[in-house]
Amino acid sequence: MVAERLAEIVGPAHVLSRQSELLVYNSDGLPGYRRQPRLAVFPGTRDEAIAVVRFLAAERLPFVPRGAGTGLSGGALADDIVVVGLHRLKKIISLDVENRRATVEPGVVNLRLNKHVAPHGLLYAPDPSSEAACTIGGNVAENAGGPHCLKYGVTLNHVLAMTVVLPSGEIVELGSKVGERDGYDLRGAFIGSEGCFGLALEITVKLTPKPQAVRTLLADFTSVDKAAHVTSAIIASGIVPAALEFMDGATIRVVEDSIYAAGYPRDAEAILLIELDGLEAGVVADQETVRRICLDGGARQVRVARDDAERMKLWQGRKKAFGAMGRLAPHLIVQDAVIPRTKLPEILATIHAVSEKYSVMVCNVFHAGDGNLHPNIAYSADDPAESERVHKAMVEIMQACIAAGGSITGEHGVGLDKLGYMESIFSETSLNAMCELRGVFDPERRSNPGKVVPVHACKEWHGIPGSAKSRGAREASPLEAEPSRPIAR
Ligand SMILES: Cc1cc2nc3c(=O)[nH]c(=O)nc-3n(C[C@H](O)[C@H](O)[C@H](O)COP(=O)(O)OP(=O)(O)OC[C@H]3O[C@@H](n4cnc5c(N)ncnc54)[C@H](O)[C@@H]3O)c2cc1C
């Protein structure tokens, strides 16, 4: 019945209800989590998307917005409810070169926007490593970052305005395309709301002029510790690189064994990829300063990419590193935490000790300049003993990051994966405040239910009227007792 009504809105070809067809929507980029949706609907126009949301509102049905499904926190998973897939909404609605802004539909892929604006000497700065697949709508929902966010800022700093369909079906405009808006600026509340506040339907982004000069440096080290200290030394020098990325020896060798081989030194224990950009004269001076800091800090050598082709190759190795890890084992857990940059040497040593303790192979590749760590473990979810060791290792690593004064996510969001850690860093009062804010956008809590704030703290998931969940008592969340367990299947 629901499927038929949705098919009337979007056409029968754009509704999936067979369980076999829905399998591809049962996970995102973190394949250890699986949740089977009941239905998936793919609106092809703005009006169809609004009509779908209004129909779901009238029926009081919960739903999960979904972009490209590259998320790394289980955020786009729908547990027996409706997926609203937005990938067909992929129009670049307008490009205003003079005022350096573009308005896009949510399903526009990040890299496609960049290719579209490049001939005009412009770029869209947030560049998640998944840029070839992830959507601007998904970037907004996760407040996505990326290597170049060190200098340019994350998605929040590049969105001027949004048209949003609230879960009730009401349309609201957040921010302004042309300048300050009267009243509260609610962009910051929506950006990073992980699909829990409704659908971003139209997004106006700020475009940045391409820098006059760019240099990409590769510094290689025989010790992780030296590379970590050099990271802090570069930032302490006052230079703000466009990007400052770290890859450890395990990651270097995985990339070099893959089709993304970039010519990284295989025998290094760490490399830093450092990009400097700006006016030619300034970049030349900064390049020399950074080279000196690296060599003084113990780098074996500092190589500068000779041309754009070499630059691209160095970046491809970095950006495809998670993909290259797919060669190691069937499953990959990608973690995301932030620590104060000065704690990098200490935390990297802890990660190493934890990996030995649990006999798991951790590959570290991350946005070092921001202190945004990504310890990754390749494993087989079909091996319960290995899964258990991976789970314990990840919990210890996350606890060490929290103890170091860090946070549980830098850019991948909370989704399902980090729910169990929320109470480690937020007080009950803060969690209640988050729930109240959510209630302003989605009083019935139908948009992406059960994500971000632990269920018992939000008292949210009493279920949709008439559903099995609403008839029973409050459903105890399996995530209440301890951090989420994505590993065993
Ligand atoms: C190889 C790889 C590298 C990555 N590198 C980075 C990186 O460098 N930086 C980074 O920040 N992330 C990175 N990610 C994570 C991921 O790509 C980002 O979180 C991205 O923003 C998700 O976009 P998506 O379109 O795939 O969204 P999805 O995964 O489909 O959804 C993510 C969340 O957004 C919500 N959502 C999606 N579209 C909308 C919409 N229009 N309105 C409201 N809510 C919506 C969903 O409900 C869900 O909660 C990486 C992922 C992979 C696989």
Image: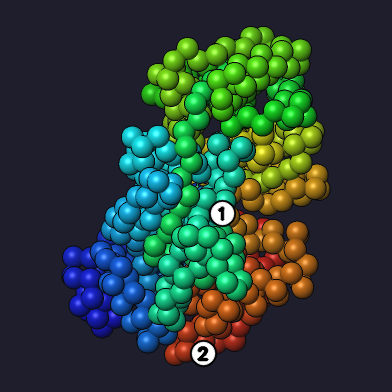
| Residue toward you, 489 or 212 | 212
Q: Is residue 204 above or below residue 371?
A: below
Residue 151 point in image, percent of width and height: 61, 37
Read off the residue under disc 1. Answer: 156
Quarter holding the N terminus is bottom left
Residue 376: percent from left, percent from top: 58, 38
226 on left or right of 17: right
Q: Residues within 10 Å of mark 2 (few under 14, many from 20)?
A: few
The residue that label 2 is drawn on is 471
Q: Is residue 27 visible?
A: no
What amino acid type is highlighted by mark number 2?
Arg
> Compared with residue 225, is residue 35 higher up or lower down, i.e. above or below?
below
Residue type of the residue flagged with mark 1: Leu
Describe the element under mark 2 as helix, strand or loop.
helix
| Residue 248 in the image, given as x and y percentages of width and height | 62, 25
Of 99 and 91, the residue lying toward us: 99
At 25% across and 68% down in the image, what residue appears? Answer: 15
- Judge whether residue 57 can be spotted in this image: yes
Could you tell me which residue is drawn at 71 percent across and 35 percent down?
Answer: 351
Q: Check the image and tell me how it is coloured.
A: rainbow
Q: Is residue 7 left or right of residue 64?
A: left
**Residue 274 picture location, percent across and down:** 60, 24
Q: Is residue 441 above or below residue 223?
A: below
Q: Nearer the viewer, residue 404 or 328?
A: 404
SS assignment at label 1 = helix
Residue under the image location 44 percent in, 15 percent down: 307
